[in-house]
Image (spheres, rainbow, N blue to C red):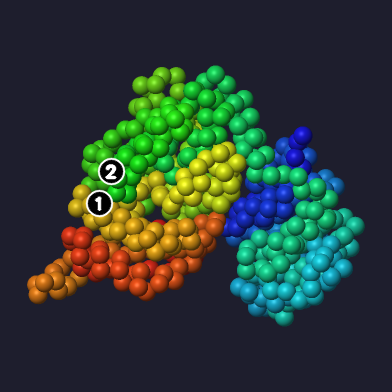
Amino acid sequence: MKNEVIVVLDFGGQYNQLIARRIREAGVYCEVHPYDMPLEKLKALAPKGLIFTGGPNSIYAADAAICDKAIFEMGVPILGICYGAQLIAHMLGGVVAKAKTSEYGRTAISLNANSKLFESLNGETICWMSHTDAVKEVPAGFNITAESVDCPIAAFENAASKVYAVQFHPEVAHTENGEMMLNNFARVVCGCAGDWQMADFAKEQIEAIRAKVGAGKALLALSGGVDSSVAAMILSKAIGKGLTCVFVDHGLLRKNEGDEVEAIFADKNKLDLNFIRVDASKRFYAKLAGVTDPEAKRKIIGEEFIRVFEEEAKKIGAVDFFVQGTIYPDIIESGLNKSAVIKSHHNVGGLPDYVDFKEIIEPLRLLFKDEVRKVGIELGLDSKLVNRQPFPGPGLGIRIIGEVTAEKIRIVQDADAIYREEIAFAGLDEQIGQYFAALTNMKSVGVMGDSRTYDYAVVLRAVETSDFMTAKSVKIPWEVLEKVTTRIVNEVGGVNRVLYDLTGKPPATIELE
């Protein structure tokens, strides 16, 4: 049975996939497509509802994103969010103008309880605003359904036409009843049954990949992390022995990690996969020599990965498909969804212009990390593997500030191993979203054994996060940090200072680079 679908039309905002995620959490399948998707293709999806996302520009800007007005004639419910709300007003005859007071952050609003969008909600709630323009006049036939002190038209709707609009962002956690609002849109307004589950996603991906690859061959870039491991399971179930998993040891892994990955994936009794390990550390070190810019390092590592994979594909022979465990935060941060480039992920924005494969397959590109883990459980992966600490593809190359050298790699590997060991000993390893040690490019004066030292500072990082789009620092017990610090300074040569990073995301990224 084909699942009901709600389509999110992407106008370039940062949180667009969060909308799709919230709809999926309501049990309704959801896809994200560009705002200028051809109308016939959009109709072919037979959506039960449409959501217009936020966006970075003014509706009156020369490069404003404007969709086909015929969308309003499809007869399906529409919800506009932020820019999407302004777009609805503008296209249907309302007025949008620069607000007297811009609103950013948590804002109290008053709701009209008669709206289906706000069904079961109290008259007052807190939402997340982020806008400079605002709707000044609603189109004919529309009613105002919410207001704030500085935004008299915080929400409006035409219930008869099933067109709804909100100036705030219900998809973010800061909007207290945002999930309920999106659930109401999907289940109450659109009338969706809510019969979609994560198991359906895995099944659909397996069937789609089986149909695409057929009797062909695919090479999967396996890191041993959650994303690539889940991707490997999907491909294995789809094409069996047509899949070869290639693990490139670029010499930038955590301490002993190469051997640990090989022990898991080369064991035919655990996972029946074609597994190849390639020691490419020397070529990566040579390419990174003298390079200090973190974005340049990502690009170099990304291209070198691809070149190794191309070489291995030629050895296997007739490999047309290249598979990656790309997930949605990678895409957003790499700027491939009309958003600003934050950093290039080696498997997305870090790819070279030319890749010698017929097609790249990314079965997880629409999922967040926690959703990927759910798919892994559905596919029968061991929970320890599914909940494994995330590790970036560029590895320690982006956890070492400045030039990458053999000495620095040794330092950060040893410091990180101590940190992970003590976190596990304290029973905190399953409570923290991600934690690691990184090496700064700063040296400072210290005193050890009555002698002067001039050594590196190590930075410890630990964050709480579920989707890896936002994060906050973890309050690790002081005694644990003291023990980690003492051990690193005493046991890791070349380090005389340990720092703890308290910065959240935003404004920082999770990695230190």
- Counting from the top left corner in percent of width and height, residue 113 is at 84, 70
For residue 262, side relative to residue 162 (left or right): left
Q: Residue at x 33, y 45 (%)?
A: 257
Measure the alpha-carbon separation of dots 2 and 1: 8 Å
Task: Specify the amino acid type for callout 2.
Answer: Gly
For residue 232, side relative to residue 496 (left or right): right
Q: Secondary structure at mark 2?
A: loop
Q: Nearer the viewer, residue 147 or 127?
A: 127
Q: Decide if residue 11 is in sight here.
A: no
Residue 513 position by quadrant: bottom left
Q: Residue at x 45, y 49 (%)?
A: 388
Residue 427 position by quadrant: bottom left
Q: Nearer the viewer, residue 321 or 232?
A: 232
Q: Nearer the viewer, residue 398 or 156?
A: 398
Is there CB contact under 8 Å for labels 2 and 1?
A: yes
- Counting from the top left corner in percent of width and height, residue 160 is at 90, 57
Q: Residue at x 52, y 40 (%)?
A: 381
Residue that mark 2 sits on: 251
Residue that mark 1 sits on: 409
Task: Specify the amino acid type for callout 1.
Answer: Ile
Q: Decide if residue 484 is in sight here.
A: yes
- The numbered mark at residue 419 is none
Q: Secondary structure at mark 1?
A: helix
- Counting from the top left corner in percent of width and height, residue 199 is at 65, 40
Q: Is residue 131 above or below residue 312?
A: below
- Counting from the top left corner in percent of width and height, residue 130 is at 62, 68
